[in-house]
């Protein structure tokens, strides 16, 4: 994939290009491990992502970020300066925690 034209004046185009790389290059590899990533947001040239599925709780997410996620995004889109994991509690984790507290009593 070749680098795209500057998108400073068009954040929608930047989002679309990031999503295209995620869908075509990154997620197919992660699907092999029952996981995927989602774009959370782009702020100040930083792409914030969430790991989902089996990748969500994997101990290798930082390695996967460095080897499988950052390189294709940084190569394809000049205006991105970094790709980072959105530090938040996911909906999956919240639902799991709720299930622990609402489990049927014996």
Image (cartoon, rainbow, N blue to C red):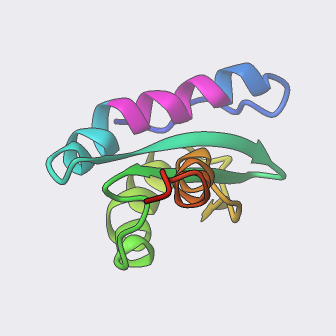
Splitting the image into 4 quarters, where does residue 11 fall?
Answer: top right
Point out residue 2 in the picture as x, y percentages from the top left corner: 40, 36
Query: Residue 26 occupies which quadrant of the picture?
Result: top left
Quadrant showing the C terminus: bottom left
- Image-based side of 102 in relation to 86, left or right: left
Magenta-highlighted residues = 15-23
Prevailing secondary structure of the magenta residues: helix
Which percent across, then down, holds residue 7? 73, 30
Q: Is residue 56 magenta?
A: no
The image shows residue 24, relative to residue 68, as above or below, that is above
Q: Work out whether residue 74 or residue 39 is closer to the camera in this orientation and state it.
A: 39
**Residue depicted at 84% across the width and 52% down the height:** 44
Residue ranking furthest to the front: 106
Q: On screen, 20 above or below 83?
A: above
Whether residue 28 sits left or right of residue 106 in the image: it is left
Determine the residue positioned at 51% across, 40% down: 38
Q: Is residue 19 magenta?
A: yes
């Amino acid at each position: 994939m070749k680098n795209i034209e500057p998108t400073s004046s068009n954040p929608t185009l930047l989002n679309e290009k990031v999503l295209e790389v995620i869908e075509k290059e990154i997620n197919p590899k992660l699907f092999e491990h029952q996981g995927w990533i989602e774009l959370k947001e782009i702020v100040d040239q930083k792409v914030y992502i969430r790991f989902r599925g089996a990748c969500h709780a994997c101990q290798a997410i930082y390695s996967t970020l460095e080897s499988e996620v950052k390189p294709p995004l940084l190569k394809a889109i000049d205006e991105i300066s970094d790709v980072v994991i959105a530090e938040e509690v996911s909906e999956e984790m919240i639902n799991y925690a709720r299930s622990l507290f609402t489990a049927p009593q014996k």
